[in-house]
Amino acid sequence: MSPAAVTTLSSLTLGSLTLDPTFDSGTTTYTASTTDTSNKITAVATDEDAIVSIAVNGSAHENDTAATWETGENTVQITVTNESNSKVYTVTVTKS
């Protein structure tokens, strides 16, 4: 893969939630727990030319804005697309 087609995230945060495991650009599946009603999701691509798309429970979500959690499991999918390559990161957020 050429450097122009990098499809990784350099950072991923969901407010102050702790990702498990700790964020690593090579890890694509995470969990987090919360009692909050919402947390801001921020995903930054390693390559500034990459496009980052976020979906929360199947609905499009704008990067760097707060997502509202339903009680139980919520699925956050972050897709990083660059040229014809893409990678999906998934976070399961459980709200109690």
Image (cartoon, rainbow, N blue to C red):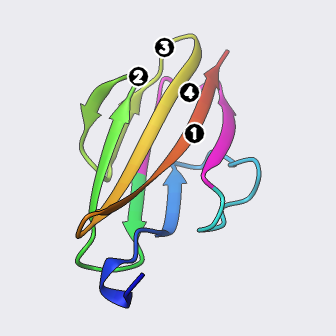
Kindly tell me whether residue 39 is visible in this rendering.
no
Looking at the rendered structure, which numbered label has been put on residue 36?
4
Which mark's residue is nearer the viewer, 3 or 1?
A: 1
Q: CA distance from mark 4 to mark 2?
A: 17 Å
SS for callout 3: loop
Q: Is residue 38 magenta?
A: yes
Q: Which residues are magenta?
A: 28-41
Residue 29 image point, x, y percent: 64, 45
Query: Where's the C terminus, which quadrant?
Result: top right
Instruction: Give SS at disc 4.
Output: loop
Q: Are marks 3 and 2 in contact (CB under 8 Å)?
A: yes
Query: Dividing the image into 4 quarters, which one contains the N terminus?
Result: bottom left
Give the labeled residue for mark 3: 70
Nearer to the camera, 12 or 4: 4
Amino acid type, mark 3: Glu
The residue carrying pointer 1 sits among few (fewer than 14), some (14 to 19) or many (20 or more) residues within 10 Å by Cα, namely many
- Is 18 located above or below residue 38 in the figure? below
Distance CA(mark 1)–CA(mark 2): 11 Å
Q: Earlier in the sequence, mark 3 or mark 2?
A: 2
**Disc 1 secondary structure class:** strand
Q: Nearer the viewer, residue 63 or 55?
A: 55
The answer to whether residue 17 is left or right of residue 7 is right
Q: Which residue is mark 1?
A: 91
Please report whichever mark, 4 or 2, sits nearer to the chain's N-terminal start.
Answer: 4
Q: Residues within 10 Å of mark 3 (few under 14, many from 20)?
A: some
Mark closer to the observer (3, 4) = 3
